[in-house]
Amino acid sequence: MSDQELERAPASPWFVQFTAFKVDPAWRRLPHPARIDGREVFASVVEEYAPVITTWAYSGIGLKIGVDLLLWRRGVDPKPMQEMTARLLNSGIGCYSEVSYQLFGYTRPSVYTRRPTSQEQAIDLDDRQTYLIVYPFSKTTEWYLMSRDARQGMMNEHMRIGHEYA
């Protein structure tokens, strides 16, 4: 993305959820047609919520133990995400899955940058890379007790390192 595109891309506030599913090995023993149907039923729930929740799916097979499927979701309201998760767990392959890990948060434009960074803007874009790196980042009470300059310095270092890995 060019600097001009970065300046134009809006940084929106979003509720964001990363839900990791572990699939029961019994799923793999089902007949192939049943697995196809199960994936289609699961996908139809994702499509049903598409007007209010944007979802990207990633395979975790061979990359992280206990994560066969990762859904990255964003929306303006957390309630549909909760409803969608319940529906997914009762639909097709979801009936053979359990949530093995979940991160939930709220993003908004950073107060530590003058203009949105490419990392912040990535959440507003619909194009995705093949791989996704997710790490939790929480600010504690101690964080807010530090001076603004100290926090800014730490964020500058954090962003500098992050920009080394597109």
Image (cartoon, rainbow, N blue to C red):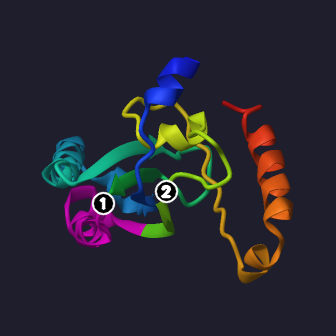
* Residue 109 tag number: none
Left or right position of 117 against 80: right
Residue in the foreground of this view, choosing between 159 and 40? 159
* Residue 76 tag number: 1
Secondary structure that dominates the magenta span:
helix
Residue 145's x, y, as percent? Answer: 79, 79
Q: Please identify the quarter of the rendering in which residue 143 is found.
A: bottom right
Chain-order first, disc 1 or disc 2: 1
Q: From the image, tell me which residue sits under label 2.
A: 108
Q: Quadrant of the C terminus?
A: top right
Residue depicted at x 56% and y 40%: 116
Within 10 Å of disc 2 (Cα), the crowding (few <14, some 14-19, many 20+) is few
Residue 22's x, y, as percent? Answer: 46, 61
Residue depicted at x 41% and y 35%: 125
- How far separated are the C-alphas under marks 1 and 2? 11 Å
Residue 82, above or below 113? below
Q: Residue type at mark 2? A: Arg
Q: Please identify the quarter of the rendering in which residue 132 is found.
A: top right
Residue in the foreground of this view, choosing between 6 and 51? 6
**Residue stretch rendered in magenta on the structure:** 77-98
Residue depicted at x 59% and y 53%: 110
Residue in the foreground of this view, choosing between 95 and 119? 119
Left or right position of 72 against 157: left
Q: Mark 1 or mark 2: which is in front? A: 2
Residue in the foreground of this view, choosing between 47 and 164? 164
Q: Please identify the quarter of the rendering in which residue 83 is found.
A: bottom left
